[in-house]
Image (tube, rainbow, N blue to C red):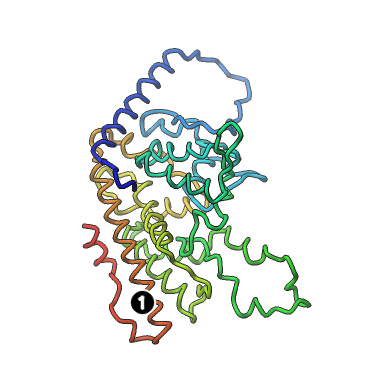
Amino acid sequence: MPKDFDAAEFAIKLKKFRADAKIKETKTKANKQVRLTQGKASKAPSRIGNMEPGGTTAETFLDGHEFIPPIAGDSRGPCPFINCMANHGFINRSGQEVPAFDIAVLAMTLFDLPDTMFPPVVNMAIFDGQVEVQEDGQTLLDIERLWNRPGEERDVSLVFPNPGLNFNEENLHIPVSDGFEPNNEEFFTDFRYEVDAPLLKQLTDRSTAGVLTIEDHQEHLRTRILNSLLPDSPEHDMFFVLSDESMHVAANQYLFPVMLLGDMVDDFTSIDTKVVEDLWTQFRFPDGFAPRSVRFGDDFDFEGFNAARQAWQDANVEIALNAFEQGKAIVKHGEGEEGEEPPTPSDAKLVAA
């Protein structure tokens, strides 16, 4: 979050943005010529991205942005929300040659996030070589390039395996005669581009009565870090890295599914488990999706929403840091000598409050 971010100022900006969209929608409907298409094959949805929502109500927001899975040759990356943008046609459905700063604008259009929040992330992607700057100044992105290191996806992903997982003693000692061939880098990289089903199940198994909470995601974060560090864990990664930047990326990643896809006006803490499953397995928005500022209008408290998000983000950073220190202490000294316990989910809730 930019240091000079003013939640109240952005709330006014967001209301004007939604009001202007309604005016534009009214004018478009008034000028639109209705064409009868009875007996004609319906036109296939465009694969060219359209940043404009289908309407200004929850019932119409996704009109013209129906979910269509990717086809052969399409590009998808590690961010489920950018993948959703492609699968719903808010950016090019191919996921290729996407104007990078459109994603920053769509963060406000789709999720009520500040439009100032993501330009620094895009600038980082340009610096990392993931976004190509054209001769005319356009900044274009193939979203699968977000996998490149350094990049948007870090160690301790919610559901993607750690990138160093295949670098273990067993794999590194495979003789050439058994398949350890030169230039076989795909063996050590390609596995991480698929959602790890056991990791996703670990998360969804935390649900209660079909509902996942922020606290469930926080406990998943803590467990992911410990399991990445502990040698006896199947998820142990001997090259596990958790930098300060990785902690902040994780801090957002572990709360975004609940906060951004929820459909209650003043409860940002829980979500239907099926929504989370569909997000990660299909990269799709839930049926009837619309951001809260569209769904609830003036009843939506953007400042309260942003304050809650910031509090949970700070709590997640603290949970990640404490779990990382605990895991390193266990590895160094063994069980029972790890020192201070990290926050439990209830502790995190107190921090967030």
Q: Is residue 268 above or below residue 180?
A: above
Q: Is residue 301 above or below residue 345?
A: above
Give the percent coordinates (x, y) of residue 107: 41, 41
Q: Nearer the viewer, residue 72 or 91?
A: 91
Q: Nearer the viewer, residue 282 or 320?
A: 320
Give the percent coordinates (x, y) of residue 218: 34, 63
Q: Which residue: 34% across, 48% down?
A: 1
- State the residue lying farthest toward the right: 177
Looking at the picture, which amino acid does disc 1 mark?
A: Gln
Q: Which residue: 50% across, 13% down?
A: 33
Q: Nearer the viewer, residue 337 or 130?
A: 130
User: How busy is the neighbourhood of tag 1: few (under 14 within 10 Å), some, or many (20 plus)?
Assistant: many
Left of 193 or right of it: where is 106?
A: left
Quadrant of res 93: top right
Q: Is residue 265 above or below residue 137?
A: below
Provide the secondary structure element on which disc 1 rests. Answer: helix
Image quarter of the C terminus: bottom left
Q: Which residue is mark 1?
A: 326
Left of 104 or right of it: where is 130?
A: right
Give the percent coordinates (x, y) of residue 334: 40, 87
Q: Is residue 165 above or below residue 10?
A: below
Give the percent coordinates (x, y) of residue 249: 41, 56
* Number of marks: 1
Quadrant of res 322: bottom left
Q: Which residue: 30% across, 58% down?
A: 314
Q: Which residue: 63% across, 25% down?
A: 41
Left of 265 or right of it: where is 168?
A: right
Quadrant of res 195: bottom right
